Image (tube, coloured by chain):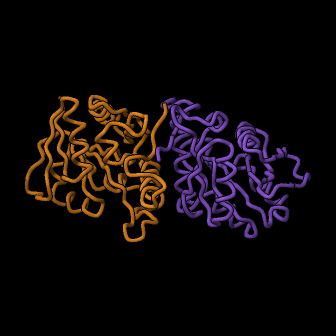
Chain colours: A purple, B orange
């Protein structure tokens, strides 16, 4: 059994929490009070990208040795037309550089909260794409996702977070422009 | 009715040809002999990205005034680990700069040939994502795709080709690493 700490209490945090507990694992959701220590072996950063720096500043020591899951889509939310991370990088890689003693994964950024909560996107099971450089960490998170009734796919090394963030960005622009709904999006047919 | 010229005779060219003709439009497929003039109002560049420069060099004048559809995934095929276009750009934008008198669209790069040919990806209709700066050109191509039994979604301006190429790249890496099959891939749930 795994114990998962989720930093954040929004709809993504709630949806990920439901996946964790459906699979028989345990979870804590922590709000913006960074003085409360995390107790999980896996820590999900379920805060907007602009809030990540503050979380890291307050918790870098606590996150050492843990699996840290970055779920952010680092959009420029003023223009909704670009990402705010380096063009040849990703939020996950920026975070990994700031947390050299953590095992950072990218996951959950290519699935809307509604499809995480329901476990379905249209006629398909919701698939969580996971990128990271640590195979054990990816296997751990994949197991939690699968136990919660969703599919997990290893999308490769952490540098593939760049493509996952492009996918998340594209999906957000399609929903914001009403080409797709917030209960739809990209599904994966294996 | 539209007349479509496809430059290329590979499996993507064949699949796009079948979509065009299913919808009651007409098509010509042209091989590597660039001396044969294109007769279509829409020209699909269905050659590998490294061959695009030669096509443009031979046909830039012919392509003036036409809708040019870039379907490439500009991978580094030696490493299968990166794209060969600028990190903040795309093949489509590179091509558009070289063809200032054409209306360049990005399309068909996020769907494997098998799902274009069958019109289905798993339980979903195959969806063609189209990016471009010319609304009329996008509408024309969307109509051809829809007439051929597939779905088309306007993915935004030509700069969104960057995200479409990231998606195509990711999908190719997933298939090459056997996480998904070449008859699967990403589907779109509207």
Q: Position of residue B169 (x, y in %)?
A: 43, 56
Residue drawn at the location 49% of the way across and 44% of the way down: A188
The relative height of residue B12 versus residue B75 in the rendered view (above or below) is above
Tag count: 0
Which residue extends farthest left? B36
Apparent side of residue B28 relative to residue A134 in the rendered image (left or right): left
Apparent side of residue B59 relative to residue B176 in the rendered image (left or right): left
Residue drawn at the location 66% of the way across and 49% of the way down: A72
Closer to the camera in the image, A122 or A58: A122
Which residue extends farthest right? A35
Q: Position of residue A117 (x, y in %)?
A: 67, 35
Closer to the camera in the image, B109 or A56: B109
Quarter holding the N terminus of chain B is top left
Apparent side of residue A182 relative to residue A147 in the rendered image (left or right): left
Q: Position of residue B65 (x, y in %)?
A: 21, 42
Apparent side of residue B123 relative to residue A90 in the rendered image (left or right): left
Q: Position of residue A68 (x, y in %)?
A: 73, 58
Q: Where, by quadrant of the figure, is residue B43 drawn?
A: top left
Residue drawn at the location 26% of the way across and 52% of the way down: B99
């Amino acid at each position: 059994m795994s114990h998962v700490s989720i930093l954040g209490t929004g709809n993504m945090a709630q949806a990920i929490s439901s996946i964790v507990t459906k699979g028989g694992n345990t979870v804590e959701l922590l709000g913006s009070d960074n003085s409360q220590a995390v107790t999980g072996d896996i820590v999900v950063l379920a805060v907007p990208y602009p809030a990540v720096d503050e979380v890291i500043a307050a918790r870098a020591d606590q996150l050492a040795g843990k699996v840290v899951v970055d779920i952010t889509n680092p959009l420029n939310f003023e223009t909704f037309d670009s990402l705010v991370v380096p063009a040849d990088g990703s939020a996950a890689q920026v975070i990994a550089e700031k947390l050299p003693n953590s095992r950072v994964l990218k996951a959950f950024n290519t699935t809307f909260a509604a499809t995480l909560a329901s476990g379905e996107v249209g006629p398909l099971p919701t698939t969580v794409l996971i990128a990271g450089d640590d195979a054990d960490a990816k296997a751990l998170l994949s197991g939690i996702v699968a136990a919660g009734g969703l599919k997990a796919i290893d999308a490769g090394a952490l540098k593939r977070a760049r493509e996952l963030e492009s996918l998340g960005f594209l999906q957000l622009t399609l929903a914001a422009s009403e080409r797709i709904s917030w209960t739809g999006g990209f599904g994966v047919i294996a």
